[in-house]
Amino acid sequence: MIQLRRELYQWHQTIDRDLPWKEDENPYKIWLSEVILQQTRVEQGKPYYYKFMDRWPTIEDLARANEDEVLSLWQGLGYYSRGRNLLKTAQQVVNEHNGQFPNEEKAIKLLKGIGDYTAAAILSFAFDLPYAVIDGNVKRVISRWFDIDTPIDSKLGLAQITQSLQQIFDIEKPAKFNQAIMDFGATQCTPKPKCETCPLKQHCKAYQNNTAEFLPIKSKKTVKKSRYFHYLFIQDGHNCVINRRGENDIWSGLHELPLIESELLNEIDIQNKVNSILTNTKLDSIAMNISNGKHILTHQNIFYQIHEVNLGKLNSDSLLIPYILYNPKEDQPLYGFPQLLKNFFLSLE
Ligand code: SF4
């Protein structure tokens, strides 16, 4: 096992991953990057990391932000509850810990949105404490090195992964070990493994048993729900109408165009919906389905259409609660939108 670790470190020296959040051991940077990297890969995550660091260089700066601003920068990453938790966690660290991340497992897990994975990442990378990070990459690597065919999304599978990982974990250099094995999973032992060029194949039981490409095993298949969204682009050439989404659903807290959700895409009453948004309204024209598509989320497929409703002049006095006016060309940074609407607004430019 020591030989495996040594060769893992030798391999790690040969790759050069530019991870800006690892330039120092600042827990704020490490936490922020880990939350972003739960949503996307390193290369796609970097621009988000830079945007957040430019806008809020310290945790105190982030704690003072408002939720709309945070969601606006977060948009495109999905799982918006994680974006909202960023703000809550920053406020907790500032208000309850004087702006210093706790370096103790129990205290760190009391922070909003911080579970086992993020806690282990902060404790090891920022404080070099002996916590093994177990993300999807690590699970894949361990399941192959030890040829574990128990589903990794089962309790037993996770226990076997954890136990096997402990056999090779480097308690003296936890940060170095965690980074090396995560990078190994991200670049070498990828979902389609690069076994022929792998410097660790002599330690890999799955390679020896020809099972690498079948591992890891997952038991649960996600059944996706289909939803049908009709958005109304009620506009007067300058402004359009938007509202904030409620809680307990996808994209909660983000803004959107007025929405009619239906069982299928062809059953809507636009006039009725407009009457619930504006008072004394005379519609100039309606253009059905000016844009449509399918937006894929982890557990849902969203089939959407956008219908244009033209009015001579929109006036905020005629809007009913909770609707507000929005100028897509001027107000962009102020509000967070689901990616499909962000793309729609960009298409108007
Ligand atoms: S031999 Fe293949 S499966 Fe085994 S560690 Fe290397 S890349 Fe992964």
Image (cartoon, rainbow, N blue to C red):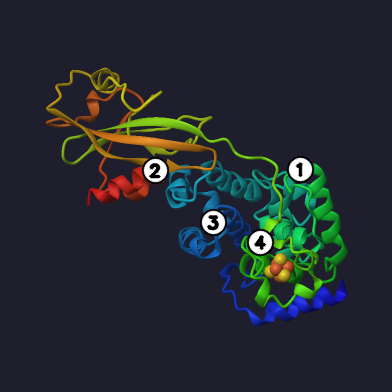
Q: Amino acid at mark 4?
A: Pro
Q: Amino acid at mark 2?
A: Phe
Left or right: residue 129 compared with residue 53: right
- Above or below, 155 against 166 in this view is above
Q: Give the CA distance from mark 3 to mark 4.
A: 20 Å
Question: Earlier along the polypeptide chain: callout 2 or callout 1?
Answer: 1
Q: Which residue is mark 2?
A: 337
Question: Earlier along the polypeptide chain: callout 1 or callout 3?
Answer: 3
Q: Position of residue 74 (x, y in %)?
A: 47, 50
Q: Quadrant of the N terminus?
A: bottom right
Q: Give the CA distance from mark 1 to mark 4.
A: 31 Å
Residue lying farthest front? 210
Q: Secondary structure at mark 2?
A: loop
Q: Which residue is mark 3?
A: 40
Q: Secondary structure at mark 3?
A: loop
- Above or below, 335 against 278 in this view is below
Question: Hey, which quadrant is residue 15 in on the image?
Answer: bottom right
Q: Residue at x 64, y 44 (%)?
A: 113
Q: Position of residue 183 (x, y in %)?
A: 65, 68
Q: Which residue is mark 4?
A: 27
Q: Nearer the viewer, mark 1 or mark 4?
A: 1
- Above or below, 150 against 173 in this view is above
Question: Earlier along the polypeptide chain: callout 2 or callout 4?
Answer: 4
**Tag of residue 154:** 1
